[in-house]
């Protein structure tokens, strides 16, 4: 199935009356009456992989420092950390330049979770909590207003009890440039990734932010057509140091589909249906995997969502090669609470069912050979766990936190969503699907370079088949 037919299929599903009605109260939900508005062109500048600190230091903070008018930073988890220290230094530098120029630069920081206490006290309203300068200085570790006089700084958090976090992570510079990282502002030394881009797709991110996070006076045009930021982001990407891997993309006018997934109230996994809410991201991912013709690569921190596992098995059954890359022990307690299971248990079940497919195919193949028929057997399944290098030192990523799905070497989905039940049922997520063999090829090469020596094969069906030969 070609990319255009795939998009048409997804748009058709999103336009079904029952889907429109089911999502009637989703926030945001501005695409409900016309899903085609989620289509946009993008100019991809660069890609990078490393720890969260490395991604911020080499891609995000240099871009923030060069902002002329406005910085919008959206993240999920916020914690005192080296990343926050570097962000504070960047904000102070930005403020000093603004003061020198005789103006203020707008900075909007949006997050969902900083501590258990914050979440317990957080209002359940999607209007969220606006943090005063005193509280953001004392509780969040940000500079006080007096320390950044050149910034019009506001901080807002949104969280809904018990488990509905706002999980997207993105940075908008002057409403012209987007940085789309997988990392939070936190102390976690995890394997992360980031894409930088500009072009019409920026309007998608801006509208999403305006519809959900922004205050009424944020609905203004803050740019003057300056293209300096886009050029500097591109140079930052190519000159990166300290990253595990990075590359310029220089890809113009790439087809993309913006994929929001609004949050929903928590439901107990064993008492409710596993059918996920029909959000653009959920529908697109399941449709994409179901239409795969040759190969599917899924990189996810966790794998606990039944329909995803079923979709991957169905792809194998069609003869598609499937590679799953995940973490062995990442947020295990959270998995149990939100999904009633763990990644390790789900991987074990996935492998067990794939072996059953192989066994069934082996028996059928013998019958077909006797009848003079040829059949295509199940696709190869490879499951890998992240394994930090032993010689990596203090900066060695300890877990993989990248969320990336690649199909047939030409379509990729990058964003905040995991292949776990929390991402598909409860938390707000955001993904971006792109169609480009060149971009996907460079991202894949960059990813493989960064992952070199950091994987352990848990299961490879080729070895199973070889034992039958």
Image (cartoon, rainbow, N blue to C red):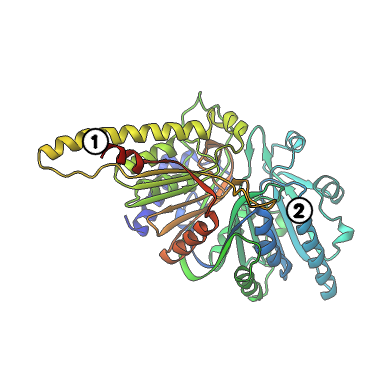
**As drawn, is 255 to the left or to the right of 231?**
left
Please report the residue visible at 48 percent of the width from the left and 61 percent of the height from the top: 445
Q: Secondary structure at mark 1?
A: helix
Please report the residue visible at 16 percent of the width from the left and 44 percent of the height from the top: 374
| Image spot of residue 392 (x, y percent) | 64, 52
Judging by the rendered image, the residue that carries numbered circle 2 is: 82
The span from disc 1 to disc 2 (Cα, nearest Å) is 54 Å
Q: Secondary structure at mark 2?
A: helix
Please report the residue visible at 55 percent of the width from the left and 29 percent of the height from the top: 267
Q: Which quarter of the rendered picture does the C terminus lie within?
A: top left
Label at residue 362:
1
| Image spot of residue 71 (x, y percent) | 71, 62
**As drawn, is 298 to the left or to the right of 189?**
left
Along the viewing direction, whichever of 457 and 224 lies nearer the viewer = 457
| Image spot of residue 34 (x, y percent) | 46, 54
Residue 180 figure quarter: bottom right
């Amino acid at each position: 199935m070609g990319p255009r037919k795939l998009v048409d299929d997804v748009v058709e599903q999103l336009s079904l009356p029952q889907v429109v009605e089911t999502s009637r109260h989703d926030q945001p939900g501005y695409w409900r009456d016309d899903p085609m508005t989620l289509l946009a062109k993008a100019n991809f500048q660069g890609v990078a992989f490393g720890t969260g600190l490395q991604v911020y230091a080499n891609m995000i903070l240099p871009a923030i420092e060069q902002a002329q008018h406005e910085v919008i930073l959206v993240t999920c988890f916020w914690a005192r950390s080296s990343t926050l220290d570097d962000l504070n230094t960047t904000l102070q530098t930005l403020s000093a330049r603004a003061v020198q120029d005789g103006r203020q630069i707008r900075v909007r920081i949006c997050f969902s979770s900083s501590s258990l206490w914050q979440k317990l006290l957080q209002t359940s309203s999607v209007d969220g909590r606006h943090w005063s300068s005193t509280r953001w200085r004392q509780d969040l570790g940000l500079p006080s207003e007096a320390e950044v006089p050149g910034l019009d700084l506001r901080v807002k958090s949104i969280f809904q009890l018990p488990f509905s976090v706002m999980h997207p992570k993105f940075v908008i510079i002057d409403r012209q440039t987007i940085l789309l990282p997988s990392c939070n502002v936190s102390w976690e030394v995890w394997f992360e990734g980031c894409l930088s881009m500009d072009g019409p797709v920026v309007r998608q991110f801006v509208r999403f932010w305006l519809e959900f996070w922004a205050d009424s006076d944020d609905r203004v045009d803050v740019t003057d057509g300056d293209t300096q930021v886009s050029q500097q982001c591109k140079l930052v990407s190519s000159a990166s140091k300290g990253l595990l891997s990075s590359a310029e993309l220089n890809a113009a006018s790439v087809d993309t589909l913006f994929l929001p997934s609004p949050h929903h109230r928590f439901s107990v996994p064993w008492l409710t249906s596993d059918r996920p809410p029909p959000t653009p991201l959920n529908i697109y991912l399941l449709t994409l995997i179901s239409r795969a013709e040759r190969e599917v690569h899924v990189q996810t921190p966790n794998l606990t969502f039944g329909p995803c596992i079923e979709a991957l098995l169905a792809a194998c059954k069609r003869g598609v090669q499937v590679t799953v890359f995940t973490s062995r022990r990442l947020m295990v307690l959270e998995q149990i609470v939100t999904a009633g299971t763990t990644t390790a248990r789900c991987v074990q079940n996935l492998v067990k069912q794939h072996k059953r497919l192989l066994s069934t195919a082996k028996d059928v193949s013998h019958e077909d050979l006797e009848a003079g028929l040829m059949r295509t057997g199940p696709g190869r399944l490879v499951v890998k766990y992240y394994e930090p290098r032993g010689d990596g030192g203090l900066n060695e990523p300890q877990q993989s936190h990248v969320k990336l799905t690649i199909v047939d070497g030409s379509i990729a989905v990058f964003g905040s969503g995991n292949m776990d039940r929390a991402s598909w049922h409860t938390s707000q997520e955001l993904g971006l699907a792109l169609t480009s063999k060149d971009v996907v090829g460079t991202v894949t090469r960059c990813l493989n370079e960064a992952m070199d020596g950091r994987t352990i094969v848990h299961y490879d069906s080729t070895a199973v088949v070889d034992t039958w030969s």
